[in-house]
Structures are given as C-alpha cells and as structure tokens.
Image (cartoon, rainbow, N blue to C red):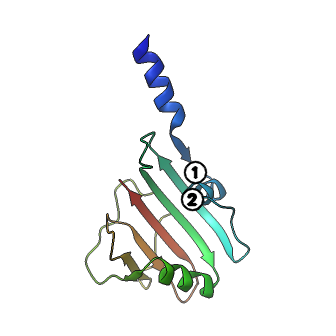
Amino acid sequence: MTILLFATLTISCSKRTNDANETFKYWSGSEVPDDIKLLKGQYYESPHFTKEYIMYLKLKPTKKWWFEYLKYNSILIDKKDWTKPSDAPIWFKPSETSLRFYRKDFDQGSRYFYDSASGICYIYEIQL
C-alpha cells in the first residue's frame, strides 16, 4: 500500500504538456507577454524537488525581447558542435542559418536558436 501511495504521489506531482502556453507558463512561471507569439511547446518536469525539467519551445518574439532575454541570462553564441536530442519533438527544427546560443555559466546542454530572416526562435532547455 505504501508503494502504491508513493507512486501515485510521484506521478501526480510531475508536469507534462504539449501545449505552448502551458509550456511557457511552467518554464517561466508567468503568462506569455504581448511581445511573444508562441508556436509550439513541449514540457516535462519530474516530481523531484529540485525542479528537473526538459522543455522545447518554438516562438516568435520581438527582436528586442529576444536579445534582452539573451543578455539578461548571459547567453552567448555557441560555436561548438551540438547534436539535437533524440527525444526532440518532430517540429523542433531550427533552420540551418539560425544562430545558436548557450549559457556559458551553466551548460547542461540547453540551446537557444534565432533565425534572423524569419524571427523564429527555438529553445531547448534541460535542467537536471
């Protein structure tokens, strides 16, 4: 009985969604600002108390919002090789011409992509 109760509590505390608005809210802790158009999202958060999560987001923010986000989070251009995770959703396809960024101070594999021609951005963030 104890194992069943623990399993139920563990499963019920995790978060999972394929809704772009919910993904953004779980990830950022806030509602979507007016200067972002969400296109796709996928989010999974484990029930672990340290907030372990994997998030994929496709969005079209204003140029101002995107570059302020990069600056605020100390996200820099990434020139290293990077392989898209095998569990990425089929829609997670940054263009070949996208600029790729990473967080220098805390790199667990998260990557941020910006296509200057379309303004479409992709975010893959992992926190373990």
Q: Nearer the viewer, residue 37 or 91?
A: 37
4 with respect to 59 (left or right): left
Q: Is 83 drawn above or below residue 11 in the view shown?
A: below
Residue 77, quarter of picture: bottom left
| Relative image position of residue 85 (x, y in whole percent) | 34, 60
11 with respect to 83 (left or right): right
Q: Is 19 drawn above or below residue 102 in the view shown?
A: above
The reply to whether callout 1 and callout 2 are in contact (CB within 8 Å) is yes
Q: Residue extending furthest right?
A: 34
At 58% from the left edge and 56% from the top edge, which residue is drawn?
23
If you read the primary sequence from the N terminus, does the residue marked by circle 1 or circle 2 appear first? 1
Q: Quadrant of the N terminus?
A: top left
Q: Nearer the viewer, residue 114 or 71?
A: 71
Any part of residue 77 in sight: yes
Q: Is 77 drawn above or below residue 85 in the view shown?
A: below
Q: Which residue is mark 2?
A: 41
**What's under tag 2, amino acid-wise?**
Gly
At 52% from the left edge and 52% from the top edge, which residue is drawn?
43
| Relative image position of residue 3 (x, y in whole percent) | 40, 17
Q: Which residue is mark 1?
A: 18
| Relative image position of residue 121 (x, y in whole percent) | 53, 76
| Relative image position of residue 95 (x, y in whole percent) | 46, 78
- Label 2 secondary element: strand
**What's under tag 1, amino acid-wise?**
Asn
At 50% from the left edge and 24% from the top edge, which residue is drawn?
8
79 with respect to 54 (left or right): left
- Label 1 secondary element: loop
Which of the labelled discs sits on residue 61, or is there none? Answer: none
Any part of residue 90 in sight: no
